Amino acid sequence: MDRLVLWDIDGTLLRSYGFGVELFAAAMRAVVGPLPPGRPAMAGKTDRQIATEWLAALGATGDTALVEQVLAALAEAVRGAAPELRGRSRVLPGVEAVLERLARAGVAQSVCTGNLAANAAVKLRCFGLDRWLDLEVGAFGDHHVDRRALVPLALAARLRRDGSAPPAGAVWVVGDTPNDLAAARSAGARCLLVATGNTRWAELAALRPDAVFGDLGEEHAVATVLAS
Ligand SMILES: [Mg+2]
């Protein structure tokens, strides 16, 4: 059967250790000026959702033009930070080996990420991970505010481009937060969670995803699950 694996990026393929938060804050400042302390939780959210919530916390509820300005500023911030990204982020254990194994097994791979499409491309290219990922048919954080809408958007992109797409039951979503699981579940896809972000293994396991790993270092086991 036609298989598809949709990867989350931050906390799953890469970690940026606060750099992503810094860049988002810079984008907010570029649009609204100096920021008071505090920010919305970011893990597992789309960049569109984070921008919307952060602006709302500053009193700009429902200002869609400002949201667009923040997203444009965020794309500019990440593009400008590309030279620094390599030094401030790292690829998580097992990632390259799993991507390679799945590619060799003929499993199609793309992303289901809260990142803006442009930023996902910058981050993945920085580490050469884009060679295994078909980004043309991914779903990204500029496409919808709600992560739960993203898996159907990825399948629609695939259908538009190729004239066919796998059924949701043949799709695995891989992520590091409860929101990744919610995105998979609402689409009828399966979900593998990995505890390399900020949510601990026990908390992820308690959500009863289809599979859960501490990290992707058990490459053979992880690839076997994702090719099933
Ligand atoms: Mg993540």
Image (cartoon, rainbow, N blue to C red):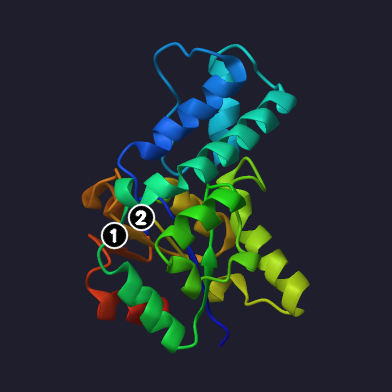
Q: Residue at x 45, y 82 (%)?
A: 103
For the residue pair 118 and 66, the one nearer the viewer reads as 118
- Could you tell me which quadrant the N terminus lies in? bottom right
| 180 displayed left or right of 101 | right
The mark nearer the N terminus, 1 or 2, is 2
- Residue 100 visible in the current orientation: yes
Q: Residue at x 51, y 54 (%)?
A: 122
SS state under label 2: strand
- Could you tell me which quadrant the C terminus lies in? bottom left
Q: Which residue is mark 2?
A: 14
What amino acid type is highlighted by mark number 1?
Leu
Residue 14 image point, x, y percent: 36, 55
Q: Are marks 1 and 2 in contact (CB under 8 Å)?
A: yes
Q: What is the number of the mark on residue 44?
A: none
| 204 displayed left or right of 184 | left
Q: Residue at x 61, y 54 (%)?
A: 150
Q: Which residue is mark 1?
A: 92
